[in-house]
Amino acid sequence: MKLLVLMALVAAVPATAALTPAETRMMASVDADQPRSIALLQRLVDQNSGTMNLAGVTKVGEMMTAELKPLGFDVVWKPLPQTKRAGHIIATHKGKPGGKRLLLIGHLDTVFEPDSPFQKFVRSGDKATGPGSGDDKGGMVVMVAALRAMQVAGTLAGANIEIVLSGDEESTGDPVEVARADLVAAGKRADAALDFEGLFREGGKDMGSIARRSSNSWEVRTTGKTGHSSLIFNPEYGDGAIYELARIIAAFRTELPEPNLTFNVGLVAGGAAASLDGDKTRMTATGKTNIIPAIAIARGDFRTLSDEQTARVRARMQAIVSKSAPLTSATITFDEGYPPMAPTAGGRALLARLNLVNRDIGLPEMPELDPLKRGAGDIAFVARDVDGLVGLGTASTGDHAPGETVDLTSIAVQAKRAAILMSRLGAEARPRKLPKALHLTAAGGSRHGTPSNSSRRDTGNRVRRLRGNS
C-alpha cells in the first residue's frame, strides 16, 4: 500500500526539467513520510531533554540512534561525565571513496528542564507547540526525513556523511574544549557543514544564513577607598568603586560601537561588600547610603562577527578599564563562549547551491540573512575549518519560551531542500582542502562590511568556558 501511495505522489509532483528522477522520488518520499515525521517529532518532544536532565538527553539520543542505524549509520554515543553533561551522538555513513564529506549538526537538548510547566507536544492543524519543537527537535526530524528520502531514492548509499548531535548546546559543558572536541574534529574532516537549527523567516520569506556571531562574556571589578560619604571626591578618598564602574560602563556605550558588534551589561552590584555566585548568575551586595562603596562588579556579553573583531573589541575594553580614576582600581576578565562564524565566499557558494535547489523545486530564492539577526550556535565551532549553511531545520516561533511553536509544513519543505542539496553535494568529488584563510571573504567584501577571518587557531585554545546558549 505504501508503495502505491509513493508511486501516486511521484506522479503528482510537477515535472521540472532540472530535477533528476531520483530527486523527484525524494520529493514524493518526503511527502509520503510526513505523518511519520510528525509522529517522531511528538515522541521526541514528549521526552524531556533539558540540558541538565542527563537521563532525558540520553533517552533522546537513544531515539535518534534508532532512526539513524536503519539508514546505514554507524552510531556512537559519547558520554561526557567530565563536563557534567550527558553526551553526544556521533554517527557516520561511509559512501563512495573520494566523495565530498558532509557534516550535519543538531542538538538533543532543550532549555526546558523537568521542572518547567511546558512539557508536552500539542498539535493544532499545521502548528504544534512543545518544548524544543523547533529548537532543535524539529531540526533533527528534518534531518531524518531528508536522509530517509535519500535512502529511498538511492542517493544515500554513495554519500559520505558525519552527524554530530550535541547533548549540551543550550548550556555547554565545562571545559568547552572537551565538550566540543568531537565536533571540532568532525569539522576538520568535512568539506561542507549543514546546521539543522531553525529556519529564519523575515517578512514571510525563508532566509538563507551563512554566518553567526560569537558570544563572549566579560566581568569588570572595581575597587575604591571606603569611608564616610561626606568625603566622596575628596583627594584623599577619590570616587569610590561604583562611580568608577559607572565610568567604565558609560565609556563602553560611547566608545565601543561599530558594525556587527553588540554588547550588553547583564548584572551589576556594588557597595561596602559585593559578591558573585559560583554560576555567575546571581550577585549580592551590602552597604549604606552614607558609606563610599569599596567594591562594584558588572557582568555582560559582547558579540562579534570575526576573530579580528573579537580581539579588537577586547583590546578597546581593556584600554577603557585601565584608565582608572584616582584611588580606584579596575580589572576586566573574559570568558569566551561560542566563536564567530564569519561570512565567507564558500558559504555564499553553498547558499547559491541551495538556491539552485529552490529554483528547481519551484520555491523562491532565499536571500542572505543579516547575521545580527541570529544568535550563536554550534556550527561556529567548525567555522574556522569548513564553510557552512545555517538554518536547515524547521520554522518556529517563540523558541526558548513556553509556547514554542513549530510550523509542521516546514518539515517537508526543509527536508526536500536538504535531501536534494545533500545528494548533489555528496555526488561530487572531494576537492583538495585548502586552509580556510585562503578562501574567506576579503576585508570589506561582505555586504555587512565584515572583516576577513584569517585565524585557524585551535578552538580549545581560544574558548575557555561557556555558560548558556545564544
Image (cartoon, helix red, strand yellow):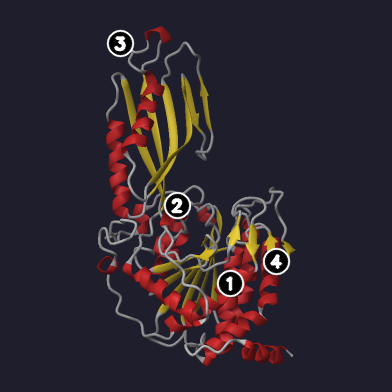
* Distance from the alpha carbon under mark 2 to that under mark 3: 44 Å
Q: Which residue is mark 1?
A: 142
Dot 2: what SS? Answer: loop
Dot 4 and dot 3 residues touching (CB under 8 Å): no
**Which residue does the numbered mark 3 point to in the structure image?**
236
Q: Which mark is residue 445?
A: none
Asked which quadrant contains residue 454, the reply is bottom left
The amino acid type, in three-letter code, at marker 3 is Glu
Q: Could you tell me the amino acid type at mark 2?
A: Pro
As drawn, the label of residue 42 is: 4
Query: Residue 187's x, y, as percent?
Result: 40, 68
How packed mark 2 is, by other alpha carbons closer than 10 Å (few <14, some 14-19, many 20 or more), is some
User: Looking at the image, which is closer to me, 181 or 438?
Assistant: 438
Dot 2 or dot 3, earlier in sequence: 2
The residue lying toward the viewer, choosing from 29 and 150, is 29
Question: Which amino acid is tagged 1?
Answer: Val
| Residue under numbered circle 2 | 175
